[in-house]
Amino acid sequence: MRTVFRTDDPQVKPYPLLTALVVPRPIAWISSLSADGIGNLAPHSFFSVACARPPIVSWTSVGHKDTLANVLATQEFVVNIASLPQLDLVNNSSAAFAPEDDEASLLDIAMEPSEHVAPPRVAGSPASLECTLHSTIELGDSVLVLGSVVAITVDESVLVDGHPEIDRLRPVARLGRDEWGLPPEVYATPRPLKPEDID
């Protein structure tokens, strides 16, 4: 027996169902600058890779928030990987700060210059994706943002043979309601290249 939630039913709220079912969702902890140079730092959990070559990532602004306004104005942003030691800071930066507030400054989050874009990156983040705006797509109450990745920076402490290791990155993820996913238990299995590789 299943409960059916019709999304065209005005009594049904799809958002809490989607965020509880599409899990875990990685966090794009996005740093940006306003046209006047005011910093903004906020987490966005509708985040993924959109294209491999050229490298493009995607994230969604649910509503027209400060991050979106900044990216549209300056065409640049940085995705900082949200790691377990920063969980409380990531969560606190989600509060509804005013546009003139710099979350990193108010929350004592250390920032440092990026390599190729103007917005700074989170100094304590183990890795970052420096991006320029590729395009946006209006989708109902949300805006899908596509960013061209111009530089990937990774702290050497999380690299093993030049590859980021998840047990060193320790990424956190969003689940439903106020739940967070902690660094996962990892199971590795070779991916078959062709059908005859399958046992």
Image: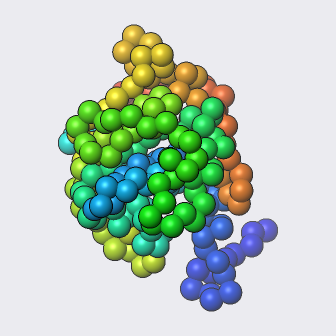
Of all residues, the one furthest to the bottom in this rendering is 10
Determine the residue positioned at 62% across, 81% down.
6
Determine the residue positioned at 61% across, 44% down.
89
Where 145 sits versus 192, above or below? below
- Rendered-image quadrant of the N terminus: bottom right
How was this image coloured? rainbow
Residue 142 rendering spot, x and y as whole percentages:
43, 72
Of all residues, the one furthest to the right in this rendering is 1
Residue 99 rendering spot, x and y as whole percentages:
45, 66
Q: Foreground: 191 or 173? A: 173
Asked where in the image residue 114 lies, by quadrant, the reply is top left
Residue 125 makes an appearance in the image: no
Residue 2 makes an appearance in the image: yes
Determine the residue positioned at 49% across, 36% down.
110
Of all residues, the one furthest to the top in this rendering is 161
Question: Is residue 170 rendered to the left or right of residue 197?
Answer: right
Asked where in the image residue 67 lies, by quadrant, the reply is bottom left
Residue 61 rendering spot, x and y as whole percentages:
44, 65
Residue 168 rendering spot, x and y as whole percentages:
55, 21
Where 198 sits versus 13, above or below? above
So how many labels did they put on this image?
Answer: 0
Question: Is residue 133 rendered to the left or right of residue 65?
Answer: left
Where 99 sits versus 113, above or below? below
Where 68 sits versus 4, above or below? above
Determine the residue positioned at 42% across, 72% down.
64
Q: Foreground: 119 or 170? A: 119
Question: Is residue 131 rendered to the left or right of residue 85?
Answer: left
Q: Foreground: 186 or 106? A: 106
